[in-house]
Image (cartoon, rainbow, N blue to C red):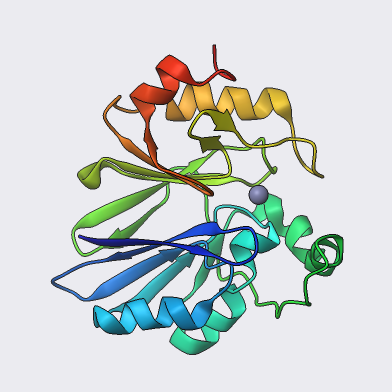
Amino acid sequence: MIHEILPVGLLQCNCSIFGDETTREAIVIDPGDEIDDILGILKKHQLRVKAIVITHAHIDHIGGAAKLKSATGAPVYMNSADQELYDNLDVQSSWLGMPRMERTEIDVAAKEGQTVALGDTPFHILETPGHTQGSISIWIPAESKLVAGDTLFRDSIGRTDLPGGDSRKILRSIHTKLLTLPEEAQVIPGHGPNTTIGREKERNPFLS
Ligand SMILES: [Zn+2]
């Protein structure tokens, strides 16, 4: 499995590009910005995008989705509980002093229990609300990797003081959905360095 992590945009959101060596299909998670660079990586590996998956509707994670969709024709997956947040994308860009971003329709409502397959490898959608109401994480058992969006970070957890945030919900999501995964599983957070489930179980000060 090809996996490239590209920090994109002002807030350096980690965009993950997964590619299957046999089918040359790709899944792009959180194309927040810098779509030309993402397209460059896809071209380098000769990949065709099958799905664009959004962990949550904050602009730094979803800002480039419309551009990537128009360049590739791939459907956009997002949890419908974040639709209202997405409808207010212009409010988010004005808070951050960022230019307005182009919007796209959400093609598939990403739900708990749903999978998106890349070749023979299923990517499982986990609903992990708390940072936003519709936050999801993506678990890839065959790779032992979790793409955690802004739910879990190395030594930290997602902020819950923005609209839709809920501090009790994020802790429940992390304890019931994420810390129950294998300890050796690699975690790719929405920002900053990777970690493992075991490390965060042991050392994350917000989870003890
Ligand atoms: Zn966020």
Q: Which of 162 and 103 is in front in this view?
A: 162
Residue 40 occupies quadrant: bottom left
Q: Where is residue 166 in the image (x, y as percent from the top left)?
A: 74, 31
Question: Is 12 located above or below residue 149 in the figure?
Answer: below
Q: Can residue 180 be seen in this view?
A: no
Question: Is 143 located above or below residue 93 in the figure?
Answer: above
Residue 83 occupies quadrant: bottom right
Q: Position of residue 1 (x, y in %)?
A: 20, 60
Question: Is 146 located above or below residue 118 in the figure?
Answer: above
Residue at position x 65%, y 55% from top? 80
- Count the labels in the image: 0
Answer with left or right where residue 42 lies relative to residue 6: left
Q: Where is residue 98 in the image (x, y as percent from the top left)?
A: 78, 71
Residue at position x 59%, y 74% from top? 64
Q: Which residue lies furthest to the top in this view?
A: 208
Question: Is 94 located above or below residue 24 in the figure?
Answer: above
Quarter of the picture holding the C terminus = top right
Residue at position x 65%, y 75% from top? 105
Q: Can residue 196 be seen in this view?
A: yes
Q: Residue furthest bottom?
A: 71
Answer with left or right where residue 183 lies relative to residue 30: left
Q: Where is residue 171 in the image (x, y as percent from the top left)?
A: 61, 23
Q: Nearer the viewer, residue 195 or 164?
A: 195
Residue 141 occupies quadrant: top left
